[in-house]
Amino acid sequence: HDVCSIKRGCGHDSSTRLLMDGLREIGEEAAWSLSSAKPGNGVEQLRDGSTDTFWQSDGPQPHLINIQFPRKARVSELRIYTNFKVDESYTPSCISVRIGTAHHDLQEIQVVDLKEPEGWITIRLAQPRGEAAAPPVPSCVPRDPEIGGAVDFVRSHFVQIAILSNHQNGRDTHLRQIQAFGPRSCSSSRPGPAEAFQLKLQTPMLQQFATIR
């Protein structure tokens, strides 16, 4: 997926910022699955690179997107494309992000509240090293701006995005694109190999994701 096609996000994110931070799209390394989908509006549409297509759920809330990596991956942020003007009550209003090794041990690490979002939304899973938390914008407000103390990235086999509610009490949801980003490499601006295996996660809940099992 072309980073340069990203127009805007939650806060001051841009394609330039992604490139400067050394992030790359890692979603193609994972297996994607959904809790439900209307025929013709599934994973393929969610990941096809076009904001004109969309995933439409077809079941009870919460609506789940599961991203499973073959090995522990370094994940820095998720980017989601929404279009409230078109999708209205199908647009998510509250999203939870959970990480773990599989369904049985997922831990919630962030919840964001959305208000009529348009375009790309960035959900950071870790704070870039040496950078203060970005001020929230009204359309995308994280409930934990410090992201549990995680720095640069979290390591996880499994990432789950849960749509907890939609605008106007809508039942099913539309998401037009999802991208997952991690660091390109362990350069001088990113943790070295030793740090990569010993993340400075400052809460007990996140410590279990700091080392390889």
Image (tube, helix red, strand yellow):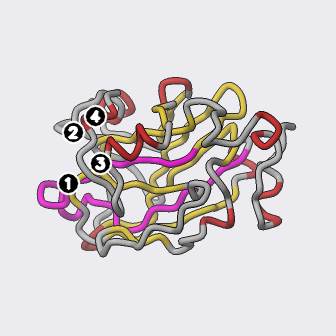
- Mark 2, secondary structure of its residue: loop
| Quadrant of the image occupied by residue 207 | bottom right
Badge 4 local density, few (<14 within 10 Å), some, or many (20+)? few
- Looking at this view, is 187 or 182 the one in front? 187
Q: Which three-letter amino acid code belongs to the residue tagged 1?
A: Asn
- Looking at this view, is 116 or 16 the one in front? 16
Report how far apart the C-alphas of labels 1 and 3 lie in the structure.
7 Å
Report how far apart the C-alphas of labels 2 and 4 lie in the structure.
14 Å
Residue 138 percent location from the top left of the image: 30, 75
The first of marks 2 and 1 along the sequence is 2
Residue displayed at 35% across by 63% down: 11
The first of marks 3 and 2 along the sequence is 2
Q: Which three-letter amino acid code belongs to the residue tagged 2?
A: Thr
Q: Are dots 3 and 4 in contact, CB under 8 Å?
A: no
- Mark 3, secondary structure of its residue: strand
Report the disc number at residue 3: none
Q: Which three-letter amino acid code belongs to the residue tagged 3?
A: Tyr
Report the residue marked by disc 1.
83
The first of marks 3 and 4 along the sequence is 4
